Amino acid sequence: MGTTKRGKLPTGVRIRTHSSGKETLYIHFTYKGVKCPEPLSNRKVDASNIKYAERLRGEILNKIDNDTFVYADYFPNSTKLKLFGKARSNEPLEFYAEQAYDNACKRGLKSVTLLNYRGKYNLLIEKLGKINPEEIDIKFVKNFYIQLYDDGMGVKALKLLRVALNATLDEVLYEGRIAINPASQVSLAKILPAASSWVSNKRLNPFSLTEINHLWETNKYSHHLNIFKIWWLIGVRTGELCALTWKDLNLEYGVLKIRRNYVSTVGVTNTPKTKAGVRDISLSDEAIQAFKEHYEREKLFDPEFVKPDSLIFKKLQPYGSQYSTTFLNVTFKEFCFLAGVTPRSSYQLRHTHATMRISRGENLWAIAKDLGHASPNLLFSNYGDYISDYEHSKK
């Protein structure tokens, strides 16, 4: 192979003559520190195409300067793609969702977290899997979240789905098929209140003491009374409550150890998600008494129910089975209806516990520790109005 010079060629444009006598037009440029000669094999070597080669090289250099050059767009069959990435594919979104999930698996996340992610990636594939990624823009993502929320998906589930969609579109971005990740530009906190009647009170709506007393009195013969009453007195998270065993409880010293968390959606018991979640709670006298009464009732019902490794709270149907988040919410709403109290999620018992202690003027650091927070910052975020009300009441 030799190089043929034909007058003065534009900078970076070359003509090569093969041993067969055939000529090929080349352009030369440097990309990411690598010299890149690329043939324009489908172009006849003449004055018109030499001018074309000059313009093409200029366009490429301009995109390199602006950091928008995608090698595969211009040279999809080039051997240089081994260095600069694969050619763009025409795969639908489900292809990238699987790539994103595979990457999550490689990060060493807890098995329960991966199970939750798998569910959200499956939902993403079901809803959007066949769509071309280029069709997804900020408005599309916003409407997608709003529709799911209006169809009944909770905020927590939406947050996890957002993580999955964001990671999926990152994979599309890395391949050069989109210029920005639209999911990264959408804030759930900004769109959900505008999307429906959702307001902060849906997240935080504690019970008054009158409502609490009426709930317990009206449902005093229910097998499920103790789990709700004790939940109100200790304020733990749902999964922590469902995972409690008798060996976690020391009634002599009034201490409850939180060491496990049950994720009912996937049926897995694991450690709490954060370091602050692993904690010892100092029980109030009322909580100690409630635990003692529950212990005696369980022991009378079945001595097997109070063995150290036995769950503190168990359902009767199926016999001795573990409570789930869904079951607790459904059952607690029945409690509310029977008592004539505005129905709320059972998780509001945790919020009621927190606001009750704040209203009594207890130390915020102690409250935060018992709730499983690293500091009182989240208390101010969730219960700021109640803290403010208490401060005003002291004046």
Image (cartoon, rainbow, N blue to C red):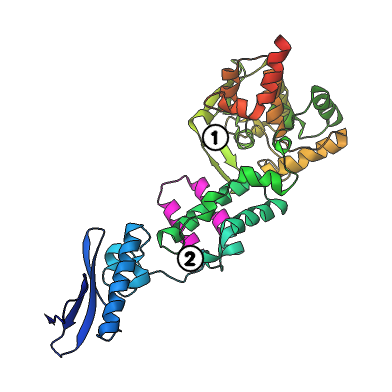
Q: Give the farthest residue toward the front.
A: 7
Front: mark 1 or 2: 2
- Percent of width and height locating residue 308: 58, 29
- Percent of width and height locating residue 319: 70, 43
- Percent of width and height locating residue 70: 36, 65
Q: Residue at x 67, y 31 (%)?
A: 303
Could you tell me if residue 107 is visible in this image?
Answer: yes
Q: Nearer the viewer, residue 302 or 370?
A: 370
Q: Main secondary structure of the magenta part?
A: helix
Question: Residues in magenta?
Answer: 94-122
Secondary structure at badge 1 equals loop
Badge 1: few (under 14), some or many (20 or more) residues near its Cα, within 10 Å? many
Q: Give the farthest residue toward the bottom.
A: 20
Q: Which mark is residue 270?
A: none
Q: CA distance from mark 1 to mark 2?
A: 36 Å
Q: Residue at x 72, y 27 (%)?
A: 352
Secondary structure at badge 2 equals helix
| Amino acid type at image mark 1 | Arg
Quadrant, the N terminus: bottom left
Determine which residue is flagged by label 1. Answer: 260
Could you tell me if residue 41 is visible in this image?
Answer: no
Q: Residue at x 77, y 31 (%)?
A: 225
Q: Earlier in the sequence, mark 1 or mark 2?
A: 2
Residue 309: image quadrant is top right
Q: Which mark is residue 95?
A: 2
- Percent of width and height locating residue 215: 82, 29
| Amino acid type at image mark 2 | Phe
Circles 1 and 2, Cβ within 8 Å, touching? The answer is: no
Q: Nearer the viewer, residue 362 or 139?
A: 139
